[in-house]
Amino acid sequence: MSAPTDLMRETGGPELHWPEVRDWLQAHPQILLDDRSLLEEIGLKPHGRNVVEFGPAALTRLEAVVTRESDARKEIEGVARANFAAQTQTHVATLDLMESRSHSDLARRLDASVQARFGLAGAVIALEKPGGVPFGWRGLEEGGVDRWLGDHGLTWLGPAFEDLDLFGAGAEAVRAVALIRIAPHIGPDGTLRSGLCAFGSLEEDGFTPQMGCELVAFIARVVERMAERWPILN
């Protein structure tokens, strides 16, 4: 009891504060080193008069750091694997589209590919009138693309519109959509015609405004270029 008594006498009273206790311990370190039971209670292991092992406390902190780093690494690796798998499926879908023999075959292959490769409800190619609309494509009234994407909008990801009449009999199952503007040179004398590729998801969070749309936009660009291979017959 001599140590606490000395401390109280030096500080001038029984009310102790940490700065005072810390200063006192710095001035009398041997008292703490000699109290082995106290050192063991606070997780420190004495190895001699001037050596104290911080093993348990240090290892606990180190294990916590390793666990956090391991969890972060696993999360990054999972995202990387998912991205790689999505890119691979996109490349395979592109090869499928490049095998198309007509506009209707292109639409059929697009729909089949996104269902098989990405688990989507389906995909549709739509084209504004006036002008012929290939079999298997959806016709839009003039200005229909701007109506959904805005005058200068290129993409839109989010919940399905109530009046988005593109997916036919499967429209009720579509909960979210990605709309990508296209403008293939398939009009008279190779003029541009406005259109879009629409991708439908069965999940409400299948497409959200926060998502990147690079992969579906890439597929839409492939569709756009492939569509220019054949003339449209009115």
Image: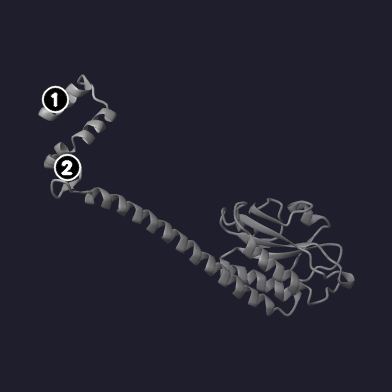
**Looking at the image, which is closer to me, 84 or 125?**
84
On the image, the x and y values in percent for residue 28 come to: 18, 35
Checking the image for residue 39, the label placed there is 2
On the image, the x and y values in percent for residue 113 come to: 62, 71
The mark tally for this picture is 2
Type of colouring: one colour
Who's the residue at 34% across and 56% down the image? 66
Give residue 139's quadrant in the image. bottom right
Q: CA distance from mark 2 to mark 1?
A: 20 Å
**Quadrant in which the N terminus is drawn:** top left
Around disc 1, counting alpha carbons within 10 Å, would you say few (fewer than 14), some (14 to 19), or many (20 or more)?
few
Checking the image for residue 5, the label placed there is 1
Determine whether label 2 and label 1 are within 8 Å by CB.
no
Q: Secondary structure at mark 2?
A: helix
**Residue at the far right in the pictured view:** 189
Q: Amino acid at mark 1?
A: Thr
Give residue 109's quadrant in the image. bottom right
Q: Secondary structure at mark 1?
A: helix
